[in-house]
Amino acid sequence: MDIKKLTIVNVVLGIAVVILFALHFMGGNTKTTHKNTVETQLPEVDSSEVATIVDVQKGMNIAWVNSDSMTMNYNFSIDLSNELEAKLKSSENKLLKLDKVLKEKYAKLEAEYKILGEQEIQQRTMELQQLQQELQMKQMELEEQLSNKSAQSTNEFVIETNTFMQEIGKELGYDYIFTFALGGQMMYGAPELDITDQMIVLLNERYALYKQN
């Protein structure tokens, strides 16, 4: 008679941010020739092309943020996580109450089984089956509500956070702001280009204003 474990869609609240403005790269085509032997011919590198790329990069304003740190300290993310956790806890409590009633009725039927008539046993058994069905339906209903709420809240989070980032990036004058995460595409970021702490402060300021509206 144990209830099934409540399942909800886990919210992955990663903040993957790349702010792209009017800058575009024109990369030269580099050809690599492979032989059918063990030896491999290395591609020829035009030193003038390399110098040009470096010069372009020097004129750009680039920064990066640590996505894990932002998720843990961004109040929007924290509030969303707490809200969904509270709804999950509330749903679990509702299911536990129904399950408790079901178990009590089952235990009572089991204890009185020998002294009950056949008609009474059938009636109580039907009541237990109906209660079990109600429990299963309630579980499915709560799961759907949690899933919908999770999707709705996550969508709002992504849209509003993107708006915040666009505003902050423009105000600070950055051409690109990349996000760093262990195992992600960004392998290295110079420490002096890390603006994670500053970005957390600015995001929280905008989120506070957003909550007031």
Image (spheres, helix red, strand yellow):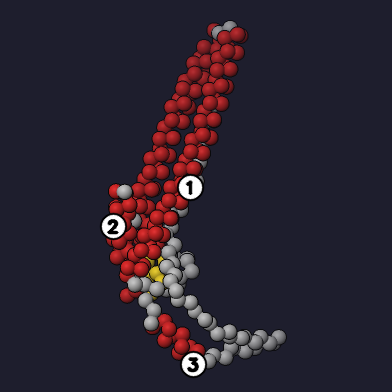
Q: Residues within 10 Å of mark 1 (few under 14, many from 20)?
A: some
Identify the image quadrant of residue 18.
bottom left
Looking at marks 3 and 1 on the same chain, the residue that comes earlier in the sequence is marked by 3
Closer to the camera in the image, 201 or 163: 163
Label 1 amino acid? Ala
Q: Tell me if residue 173 can be seen.
A: yes
Residue where numbered disc 2 is placed: 205
Q: Is residue 53 above or below residue 69?
A: below
Q: Tell me if residue 178 can be seen.
A: no
Label 3 and label 2: CA atoms lie apart by 45 Å
Identify the image quadrant of residue 173.
bottom left
Looking at marks 3 and 2 on the same chain, the residue that comes earlier in the sequence is marked by 3
Q: Secondary structure at mark 3?
A: helix
Label 2 amino acid? Glu
Residue 74 horizontal/vertical position (percent): 34, 56
Residue where numbered disc 3 is placed: 48
Q: Residue at x 44, y 74 (%)?
A: 22
Q: Secondary structure at mark 2?
A: helix
Looking at marks 1 and 2 on the same chain, the residue that comes earlier in the sequence is marked by 1
Q: Residue at x 51, y 34 (%)?
A: 141
Label 3 amino acid? Ser
Residue 167 horizontal/vertical position (percent): 36, 63
Residue where numbered disc 1 is placed: 151
Residue 188 horizontal/vertical position (percent): 42, 73
Q: Residue at x 43, y 27 (%)?
A: 97
Q: Which mark is residue 206?
A: none
Label 3 and label 1: CA atoms lie apart by 50 Å
Q: Residues within 10 Å of mark 2 (few under 14, many from 20)?
A: some
Q: Is residue 103 above or below residue 186?
A: above
Q: Secondary structure at mark 1?
A: helix
